[in-house]
Amino acid sequence: MFYKKLNKKIALLVFLIIALLGLWLIFDVIPIGPGLPPSEGMPGWYIPGAWQGNEQGCTSLFPKISPYCNAGNYSEEELINVWYFDDESEFLKGEDTLYRYLEENGNVFYQELNISEELQEVIERRETENVWSPIYSPYAFNATGYKSPETSGYFLVYEKPFLKGRDDYFIVYYGVRNTTNLAKEAPKLKKLIAESYYMANGEGKVDSLKPENKKGKDNSLFSWF
């Protein structure tokens, strides 16, 4: 009798260990998240209304830095353009290419954005509509501002918004055509960012563009100290 009880306890312990290992593999190791579209459909994740057909094809305002690109229009002038990368090295190359283009064709600057009020409005509206979408902090982050005669707006980078074990990188442009008065358009663009904002991974990151040459300068500065 004693050995039967002991064997049952051992069997239960082995079962629990296997179950825990299985859960760990699912949530921490396996790079494919449940319910996520293929790479071709990923840009729509940050385009409000994409699933209702509000995708217009990649804008010609910027260089082609990813084969996975799409845009959404929200008025005659407002737009969102999304580039998706499923590989970190390709993301870094695309980010650097885009930044160099921006420097050559317009005015580039860094700006901190705080969209806490706009996000709160979105959250409250979604609650009344029984629509749930995970939104984790930060609500304030650095963005890359851009001004040119053709378009002005903000670039954001979303790194690993789904699972920390997945390579998912998005560069998203929130902009307005045919203006350089970004200060006037900022309130509308902050609302557009809040509508598009998605971050389900507490360890994910929202930040500005980080071109390769500036990363090198940062590294050399720290190495000098």
Image (cartoon, rainbow, N blue to C red):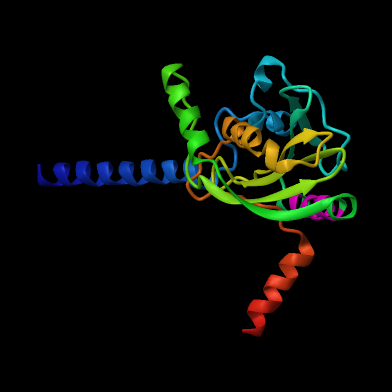
Q: Is residue 193 magenta?
A: no
Q: Spot the residue most to the left.
A: 1
The residue lying at 88 percent from left, 34 percent from top is 60
The residue lying at 65 percent from left, 20 percent from top is 49
Q: In which quarter of the view is residue 108 placed? A: bottom right
Instruction: Check the image and report above or below for 46 versus 167.
Output: above
**As drawn, is 77 to the left or to the right of 7?**
right
Q: Which part of the image, by quadrant, shows the C terminus?
A: bottom right
Residue 85 visible from this viewpoint: no
> In the rendering, at what x and y percent does residue 152 appear?
78, 41
- Looking at the rendering, the stretch of residues picked out in magenta corresponds to 91-100
Instruction: Check the image and report above or below for 87 versus 70.
Output: below
Could you tell me how many numbered marks the image carries?
0
> In the rendering, at what x and y percent does residue 65 appear?
83, 44
**As drawn, is 97 to the left or to the right of 174?**
right
Depth check: give the residue in front, 177 or 37.
177
Q: Is residue 94 magenta?
A: yes
